[in-house]
Image (cartoon, grey):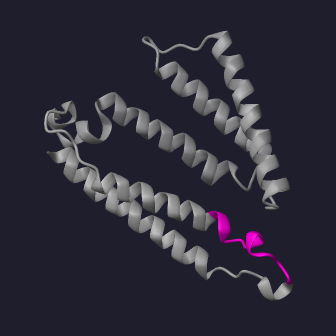
Amino acid sequence: MIDGILDRIMGTAFCVAGLAVLFEAWRMPRFLEQGASLYEAPGLTPGLLGIALAISGLALALRRRSTGSQASEHSSLNEVFFGSASGARRLLIALAITGIYALVLFGRAPFLLSTILFVFIFTITFGALSKDPPRVSLRATIEAAIIACLVGFGSRYLFRDIFLVPLP
C-alpha cells in the first residue's frame, strides 16, 4: 500500500523535475542567428534528458502494483526507502563519495584524474560492501582500475570532443 503511494509521489516529482529541465532547456539560446544548426543548440541534450526523466516519472507514477507483492509487506518507511539499516549506510557512503567528487575534486583537480579516482573508489567500496565480510581482492582492484580508466577517458572524450564542453 505505502509503496504505491510512494511510487506516485516520487513519479510525480520526477515528472515535474523532467518538465522543468525541458522548460529551462527550451529557454536556452539556440544560436540560430549565428548560423548554428538546431542540433548544436546547448539545450538539446538537457532537453532530451528532461523528456526521458518526465516519461520515466510518469511511468512510475501511473504503474499498477499487484496486490500480493512483497513490497507491500514493509513495516516502516526506513525499510521502504532503504530496505534495511545497511541500505541506509550504503546510501550515506554513496552520498559522501559523490559529495567529495562534486564539492572537493571537481574543478580543483584535473577532470580526468578526479573522475578516474571517483569511479575507482566508488567501485572498490561497493564491491567490497557486497561481500560478507567486506573485502577487496586483487582481481577486484584491477577490474575497478580498468573500469575507472574506461569511464574517465570515455567521459572526457565524450564531453570534450563530441559535445565540445570545456572541462576543468
Where on the picture, by quarter, is residue 56? bottom left
Question: Taking 94 as reference, is 161 above or below it?
Answer: below
Quadrant in which the N terminus is drawn: top left
Toward which corner of the image does residue 32 lie, by quadrant? bottom right
Q: Quadrant of residue 13?
A: bottom left
Position of residue 162 measured from the top left corner of the image (x, y, whole percent): 81, 55
Question: Residue at (36%, 59%) from the top-left corner?
Answer: 58
Q: Which residues are magenta?
A: 35-45
Q: Please tell me which residue is depicted at 39% across the width and 68% down the height of the picture.
A: 16
Number of numbered labels in the structure image: 0
Vertically, is 2 above or below 75? below
Residue depicted at x 52% and y 77%: 23
Asked if the magenta segment contains residue 74, the reply would be no
Where, quadrant-wise, is the C terminus in this rendering? bottom right
Task: Please say if 16 is above or below 134.
Answer: below
Percent of width and height locating residue 68 = 14, 33
Residue farthest bottom in this picture: 33
Q: Nearer the viewer, residue 138 or 8?
A: 8
Image location of residue 140, percent across then percent down: 64, 16
Q: Is residue 110 visible?
A: no
Q: Residue at x 74, y 46 (%)?
A: 155
Check residue 44 for magenta coloring.
Answer: yes
Q: Nearer the viewer, residue 3 or 146?
A: 3
Going by the image, does 128 lie left or right of 44? left
Along the line of sight, the residue nearer the viewer: 79 or 13: 13
Residue 120 shows up from this direction: yes
Q: Is residue 21 left or right of residue 132?
A: right
x then y, percent, for residue 70: 19, 30
Q: Is residue 152 left or right of residue 84?
A: right
